[in-house]
């Protein structure tokens, strides 16, 4: 199944794979893409994404190396400075 170019770019930037994203995180990405393309009429832009959202990466330490947890280690949230703010 083809993946949206914006999702691929996010995964490359944060160095995660699809199984690392939580279901709610995937919903946030899909809603953001739908908002940009459907409502705003623009291509999704990383700077706008970064302005609105943050990603928390949970890692585990194996020896001296930090690795992503096997599944669901990347949770996506609104930035604390944006919650409850009216634009």
Image: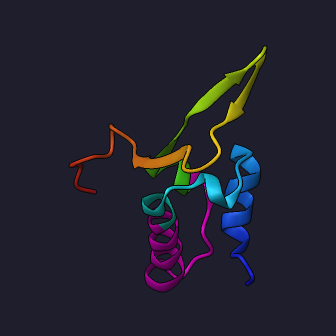
Above/below status of 42 relative to 58: below
Magenta part of the protein: which range?
27-47
User: Which quadrant would residue 27 be assigned to in this image?
Assistant: bottom left
Number of labels in the image equals 0
Which image quarter is the N terminus in?
A: bottom right
- At x 47%, y 50%, the residue is 76
Residue 61 falls left or right of residue 39:
right
Question: x, y percentage for residue 84?
Answer: 21, 49
- Farthest residue in the top direction? 64
User: Which quadrant would residue 35 be assigned to in this image?
Assistant: bottom left
User: Which quadrant would residue 62 be assigned to in this image?
Assistant: top right
Question: x, y percentage for residue 28?
Answer: 45, 63
- At x 44%, y 72%, the residue is 31
Question: x, y percentage for residue 85?
Answer: 24, 49
Question: x, y percentage for residue 72?
Answer: 54, 50
Comparing 31 with 22, the one in front is 22
Above/below status of 71 relative to 66: below
Secondary structure mostly seen in the magenta stretch: helix
Above/below status of 52 relative to 37: above
Does 46 appear in magenta? yes
Comparing 74 with 6, the one in front is 74
Residue 83 falls left or right of residue 45:
left
Comparing 68 with 10, the one in front is 68
Does 52 appear in magenta? no
- At x 33%, y 38%, the residue is 81
Above/below status of 21 relative to 80: below
């Amino acid at each position: 199944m083809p993946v949206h170019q914006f999702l691929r770019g996010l995964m490359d930037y944060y160095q995660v794979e699809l199984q690392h994203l939580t279901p709610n995180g995937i919903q946030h990405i899909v809603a953001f893409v739908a908002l940009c393309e459907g409502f705003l009429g623009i291509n999704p832009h990383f700077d706008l994404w970064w302005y609105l959202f943050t990603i928390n990466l949970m890692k585990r330490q194996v020896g001296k190396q930090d690795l992503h947890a096997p599944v669901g280690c990347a949770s996506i949230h609104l930035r604390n400075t944006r919650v409850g703010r009216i634009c």
